[in-house]
């Protein structure tokens, strides 16, 4: 389905199926098992203020020049430096038609900026002053512009997860806490691993091989030390007969 959007934006490159796969893998690594369907996803198009900054630091007559890029969420006025990573994989475009996945089940929410340009500049200045311990006159901003970023989101019972719809690499998966596994969970994982990876023959082979090696070790030790064992048996019998 095509939706009209006139603002500069990153194109959607990550399809729902890939997004679901990334989310489920992230959850599984933390010990959670969810069966997420594509129609549980929804797409948000969020505006960000992007700009370049230069900072000149003079400390003890040693000059250090910092020149980087930064981004600020135009809805909540918060810095999000991770979003800059998207530029490594894609470039923003101006294209009115938003070619979203062709399915009616997916909800699309295009957000409108709340933070104006001047306010964004002030927030960025304050953030950089604190981060680099510099004064405002040491910071120079350039090329500030508003660019829309697409994100896949899903609401679960314990988590609200999101990932960018360009690469899937920029996300908030750090909110997923590692689940403490019970002994029953560990046993289930072993059987699941055997079933899914078809490792039953190798597991059984290892089990019986271990038993055989144990029995072999016992007989070998008995054969090596048969004299001592005979003496022990003899002494044991004598003690038994004496106290019978």
Image (cartoon, grey):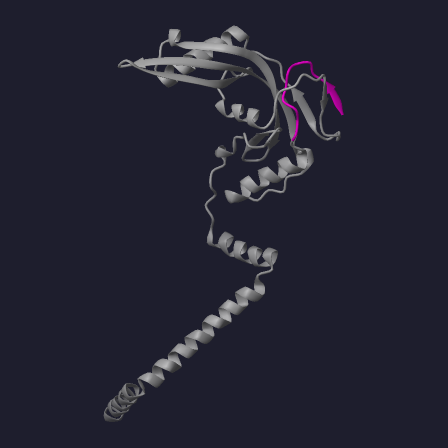
Q: Residue at x 60, y 60 (%)?
A: 198
Vertical comparison of 18 with 88: above or below: below
- Residue at image position (25%, 92%) is 238
User: Residue 201 appears in which quarter of the rendering?
Assistant: bottom right
Residue range in magenta is 1-13
Please give the name of the residue rendered at 35% of the width and 80% of the height, measured from the top-left corner. 221
Q: Is residue 100 left or right of residue 237?
A: right
Comparing 56 with 99, the one in front is: 56
- Using the image, determine if residue 231 lies above or below residue 134: below
x then y, percent, for residue 143: 53, 11
Residue 94 at what x, y percent from top left? Answer: 67, 16
Q: Is residue 121 magenta?
A: no
Q: Residue reaching furthest front?
A: 62
Instruction: Give the quarter of the figure containing the N terminus.
Output: top right
Taking depth in this image into account, of 135 and 197 the one nearest to the observer is: 135
* Vertical position of residue 232 compared to residue 46: above or below: below
Question: Horizontal placement of 163 versus 104: left or right?
Answer: left
Image-quadrant location for residue 147: top right
Q: Nearer the viewer, residue 169 or 200?
A: 169
| Quadrant location, the C terminus | bottom left
Residue 225's spot in the image, x, y percent?
30, 84
Query: Where 89 falls versus 70 (above or below)?
Result: below
8 within the magenta span: yes
């Amino acid at each position: 389905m095509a939706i009209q959007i006139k603002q500069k934006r990153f194109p959607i490159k990550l399809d729902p199926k890939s997004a679901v796969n990334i989310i489920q893998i992230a959850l599984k690594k933390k010990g959670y098992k969810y069966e997420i369907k594509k129609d549980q996803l929804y797409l948000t198009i969020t505006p960000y203020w992007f700009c370049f900054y230069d900072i000149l630091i003079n400390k003890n007559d040693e000059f250090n020049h910092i020149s980087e890029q930064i981004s600020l969420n135009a809805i909540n006025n918060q810095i999000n430096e991770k979003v800059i990573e998207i530029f490594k994989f894609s470039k923003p475009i101006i294209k009115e038609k938003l070619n979203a996945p062709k399915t009616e089940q997916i909800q699309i929410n295009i957000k409108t900026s709340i933070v104006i340009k001047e306010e964004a500049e002030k927030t960025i200045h304050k953030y950089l002053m604190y981060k680099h311990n510099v004064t405002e006159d040491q910071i120079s901003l350039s090329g500030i512009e508003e660019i829309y970023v697409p994100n896949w989101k899903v609401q679960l019972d314990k988590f609200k997860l999101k990932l960018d719809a360009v690469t899937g690499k920029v996300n908030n998966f750090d909110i997923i806490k590692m689940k403490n596994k019970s002994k029953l969970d560990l046993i289930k994982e072993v059987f699941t691993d055997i079933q899914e990876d078809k490792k039953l023959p190798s597991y059984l082979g290892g089990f019986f091989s271990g038993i055989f090696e144990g029995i072999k070790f016992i007989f070998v030790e008995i054969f090596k030390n048969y004299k001592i064992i005979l003496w022990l048996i003899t002494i044991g019998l004598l003690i038994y007969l004496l106290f019978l």
